[in-house]
Amino acid sequence: MEQRLIHTPEGVRDIYGAELARRKDIAERMLKALKLYGCREIETPVFEYFDIYSKETGTTPSRELYKFFDREGDTLVLRPDLTPPAARCAVKYFLDGTDSVRLCYSGKVFQNTLNLQGKLKETTQIGAEIMGEPSTDADAEILAMAAETLRAAGFEEFTISMGDVDFFKGLCEEAGLSGENILKLREYISIKNYYGAAQMLEHRNVDRRISELMINAGDVVNAADLSDIREATTSKKAVAALDRLIKIYSLMEKKGLGRYISIDLGMLSKFNYYTGLIFRAYTYGAPDAIVKGGRYDGLLESFGKDVPATGCVFLLDDIMSALRDRGQKTTEEEIQRFEYNEDNREEVLSKVAGLRAEGIPAYGVFKGK
């Protein structure tokens, strides 16, 4: 029993020493970069009411939540995602006028899933939100924030792949798909199972032109290709999505960040609250995205304010892993340790106090009788 108590539960771990120092340094740099874009920092509770993550808001499935009850019998959850709490906080404290709001934050999130694939159940996220701005300029701004924050963390080689969920929705409408068919197709495309997607579309007699657009949408394309794809669909929703992506890409080039941007029209998310732009950032040494984000214009309405919003979240644990692969290390700050007894107590403790005044960690240990 004693041996068991010194170990952490499955899916969580201790962080200490040089790793913790490096982690805090990177997090501070990233938050500083976000604040340069006008973001005000907020901090939300580790647990929230279950309804914030209900099916209606399109967030994490109930089975993947850590749920418990308070003394009043209300169902609470450990937050699995920081965007809904940020939206709730913004509605309560900030969105009381016509001005837009920019917020940033950092904190722990928790996902109770069996399909870990080597990932932790407790991780740290850093995020930013722009609320009250419906324009493509705001979408380009959140992409620029993502790029500049990654650079502040120490990355120079990375790609931000962007798409638009309305492209997929528009094609589904054009194909006459609905309900469970859309959910199944979304699942196939999300995991890049294009054979399964093609077979499903064929069984439902979907027009070959639309099927090819859906299946080939997963191939990363250049901005120049969007005009050709635009001519291949009659869906107004899909065309509008492509037009937005063309404009966003142009804005990113004007910001001098176009080299970081690629386009993936097959990009989807398990979070159903995304309504337009969706993006992910990838780099060497990370098996999956280290940044995720997009536009979620309908989410704040769940909290009483019909306000457009766009945002992103940085996955700090994956970012740290990628930085370790680059050989970036931090040596733990040396702590000065002194022993003293009854005879030299005053002298040693005075020296320790002087070192602390200079910003040098130090302490004394009594070794007398």
Image (cartoon, helix red, strand yellow):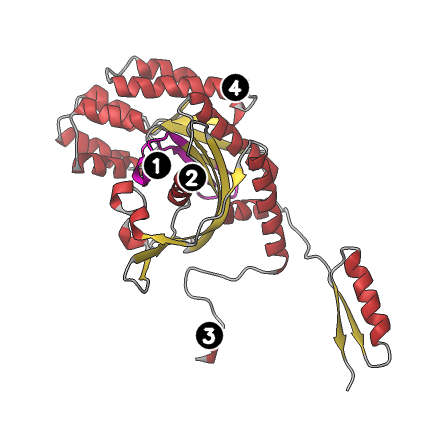
Of residues 231 and 15, the one nearer the viewer is: 15
Q: CA distance from mark 1 to mark 2?
A: 9 Å
Residue depicted at x 63% and y 54%: 21
Q: Nearer the viewer, mark 3 or mark 2?
A: 2
Q: Which structural element holds mark 3? A: helix
Of the two numbered discs 3 and 2 on the same chain, state the one appearing first in sequence.
3
Residue depicted at x 45% and y 29%: 100
User: Which residue position is annotated with label 1?
Assistant: 300
Q: Position of residue 354 (x, y in %)?
A: 82, 61
Of the two numbered discs 1 and 3 on the same chain, state the one appearing first in sequence.
3
Q: Which structural element holds mark 4? A: helix
Q: Which region of the structure is painted magenta?
A: 282-309
Q: Which structural element holds mark 2? A: helix
* Amino acid found under the numbered disc labelled 3: Leu
Residue depicted at x 13% and y 30%: 204
User: Which residue position is annotated with label 3?
Assistant: 5
Q: Which structural element holds mark 1? A: helix
Toward which corner of the image does residue 94 lie, by quadrant? top left
User: Which residue position is annotated with label 4?
Assistant: 253
Tell whether label 2 touches label 1 (CB within 8 Å): yes
Crowd class of label 3 (few under 14; some 14 to 19; many from 20; radius 10 Å): few
Q: Is residue 367 left or right of residue 101?
A: right
Q: Is residue 109 left or right of residue 169?
A: right
Up/down of 184 relative to 71, above or below: above
